[in-house]
Amino acid sequence: MSIITIIQSLALSIGLGILLRYIVRYVLFLYAFFIRSPINIKKYGSWVVVTGATDGIGEAYCHEFAKKGLNIVLISRSLDRLKTKASEIENKFKVQTKVISFDFNTTDDSKYQGLFKQLTGIDIGILVNNVGISYDHPMYLEELQPATIESLINLNVRAATVLSKFLLTSMVEKKRGVIINLSSVSGITPIPLLTVYSGTKAYIEKFSLALNLEYASKGIFVQCVTPGIVCSKMSKIRRPSLFVPNPTNFARSAVSTIGFDRLTTGYWSHEIQAFFLRSLPSFIVDKLMLDMHLGQRKRALNKKKSQ
Ligand SMILES: NC(=O)c1ccc[n+]([C@@H]2O[C@H](COP(=O)([O-])OP(=O)(O)OC[C@H]3O[C@@H](n4cnc5c(N)ncnc54)[C@H](OP(=O)(O)O)[C@@H]3O)[C@@H](O)[C@H]2O)c1
Ligand SMILES: *[C@@H]1O[C@H](CO)[C@@H](O)[C@H](O)[C@H]1NC(C)=O
Ligand SMILES: *[C@@H]1O[C@H](CO)[C@@H](O)[C@H](O)[C@H]1NC(C)=O
């Protein structure tokens, strides 16, 4: 064999290898979102705890779990709203609920003792660390108020960490449990003008994946969900579209990935977006993100001026 033919066949095999890799990924993607049947999530325990349960993605998760016959503990600040949302769930799905009013915006871990007390003695199979906030609008770090930085870290980082640690103990004893952490695509790729939000979501992603390595052998399934944009108060988008699902469709899809995918966007069209964010050269993605958020910032400031 001449050197040319060796190089040619080498190049051909590398090309075929890369192609095969993409084909396998594509088939796995189709299987995960359109073919695979979900596991029986009741096997982890009869109760689910959801933080930030009264609106958006958290509320939709509650409904999806209740539809599958699980009892729900709802946690957020407003007791009135908690009661309304809980009785909606009880009437519609005939399951039990429990509400806990708690403000996660605190650096004082001792405040959590009251919350822990109300969670003891319940057979909790699944924890959804969903509570989280973002900026009012994209901003430079210098413009960000110290109070906003503090709340971002309290809600997006501290709440999930403290609560997971508490519930892990009983899950490890029972050798079963699921912890779901809501990150975001902005944990996958750096988002300019939302630096602190982006950073807190990257923390969630790394912590979830690392914790998985610690606890997978102890029967705990830790999942990190990194959605793109979902209609909600936080995203300020009301009308669903191909790439912006409403929370109900998002949660139905995300719940069906429990027990299988440890890192997922939770929704098929977000999976396609994440694929491109990960594979395009970073100078393209970075420019796209910067332009997009500078635009959002400008529109938000103009709107404020005209009010
Ligand atoms: N929407 C998106 O496009 C999107 C994309 C990627 C990731 N995510 C992530 O998904 C999660 C949920 O987002 P979302 O859009 O559904 O949010 P949302 O609609 O703003 O809902 C927030 C929920 O959290 C509660 N909450 C807010 N502050 C709280 C506090 N200090 N203590 C306790 N509870 C509090 C709210 O109820 P009260 O006000 O009554 O407390 C409400 O139930 C977040 O972690 C977010 O980062 C969202
Ligand atoms: C969170 O708490 C800090 C300190 O008490 C406060 O300044 C900030 O406004 C609070 N943030 C939210 C979102 O309530
Ligand atoms: C998310 O996942 C693990 C699983 O329990 C948890 O311990 C970790 O602290 C959670 N939160 C964050 C902030 O990643």
Image (spheres, helix red, strand yellow):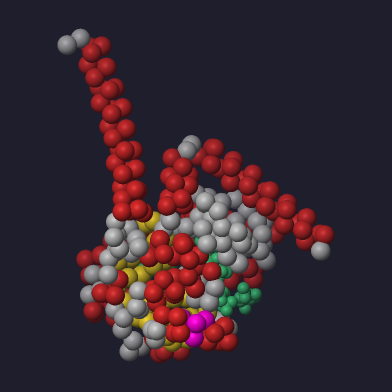
Please identify the quadrant where the C terminus is shown.
Answer: bottom right
Q: Position of residue 286 (x, y in %)?
A: 56, 43
Q: Which residues are magenta?
A: 85-89
Judge from the rendering whether residue 276 lies leftward or rightward of residue 1; answer left or right.
right
Residue 34, compared with residue 125, is above or below; it is above
Ligand 3 placement by image quarter: bottom left
Q: Nearer the viewer, residue 44 or 248?
A: 248
Q: Residue furthest left?
A: 1
- Camera-nearest residue between 186 and 70: 70
Inspect this view and state whether residue 164 appears.
no
Residue at 57 percent of width and 65 percent of height: 232
Question: Which residue appears at 68% of the width and 48% of the height?
Answer: 295
* 242 on left or right of 93: right
In the image, residue 87 lies in the stretch drawn in magenta: yes
Task: Tell me which residue sits at (67%, 48%) in the image.
Answer: 294
Counting from the top left corner in percent of width and height, residue 298 is at: 73, 51
Image label count: 0
Rendered position, 113 above or below 65: below
In percent of width and height, residue 165 lies at: 37, 75
Say if residue 60 shows up in the picture. yes
